Amino acid sequence: MTQTQSATISTRLNWLRAGVLGANDGIISTAGLVVGVAGATTSRAEILTAGVAGLLAGSLSMAVGEYVSVSSQRDSERAALELERRELAEDPEAELIELTELLAGRGLTREVAREAAEQLTERDALRAHARVELGIEPDELANPWHAALASLVAFTAGALLPLLAIVLPGASVRVPVTVGAVLGALVLCGVVSARLGGAAVGRAVLRNVLGGGLAMAVTYAVGTWLGAG
């Protein structure tokens, strides 16, 4: 597997992990909201209104936040590449020595590191420094629009589950149905995120389920109290 292929796979895994976490946020935040409102009222229209408002606010907030974050990252990467391009033009020998030192620091002998640095510089000096020195793949800078859309879609997909679970059943069973559906979805998200991150599945699932369960319990209790008042 080439370095480019490895970087591409790593990028896709990061996007997938971010998607799972975005869906997880959509599930928990929307579930907490609609269960809280259901504790205060049995009106399906009011619950649906609150749920849709929460879905739109959450998904748009996630999209904007991701766009700003990735845009800042991309600007920083472009600035670093431009600085590297200027240094290569002004003092190529110093940059060759720097690349040799970096390669030697990765375990190559001085002679092999020098030869590799010369070959990489001859092929594409900027790309070599971007990868080895900066850890950047010049042709695969993150796209803020893609990140924003992915966050919006992931959050919305997660939020739809508790929203549908709370408005479709009858008033007497809507909260238990929603809690069951949400906890099941959180188990799945915990398993997937743990697998992607190479973490312990049991701990990730437990943390996810406890966090979601606590959020719903607190908002339902507050909603019931406010509704009774």
Image (cartoon, helix red, strand yellow):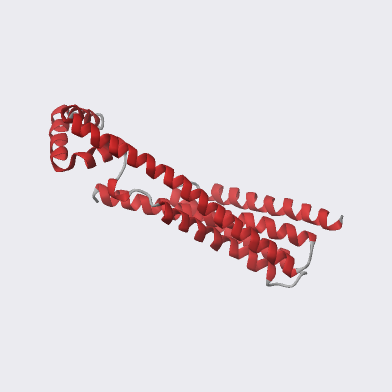
Is the C terminus in the top left, top right, bottom left or bottom right quadrant?
bottom right
Residue at the image point whose x is 65% and y is 67% from the top: 165
**Spot occupied by residue 185 in the image (x, y as percentages of width and height):** 58, 60
**Spot occupied by residue 196 in the image (x, y as percentages of width and height):** 44, 52
Residue at the image point whose x is 73% and y is 69% from the top: 45
In this picture, is 191 found above or below 164?
Answer: above
Residue at the image point whose x is 22% and y is 29% from the top: 104
**Spot occupied by residue 3 in the image (x, y as percentages of width and height):** 26, 47
State the residue lying farthest toward the right: 229
User: Is 9 displayed left or right of 38 in the figure?
Assistant: left
Find residue 81 and report its image quarter: top left
Depth order, front residue of 119/92: 92
User: Is 17 displayed left or right of 80 in the figure?
Assistant: right
Depth order, front residue of 42/80: 80
Residue at the image point whose x is 78% and y is 67% from the top: 42
Do we see residue 70 in this rendering? yes
**How many numbered marks are there?**
0
In this picture, is 9 found above or below 41?
Answer: above
Find residue 38 and report its image quarter: bottom right
User: Is 66 displayed left or right of 91 in the figure?
Assistant: right
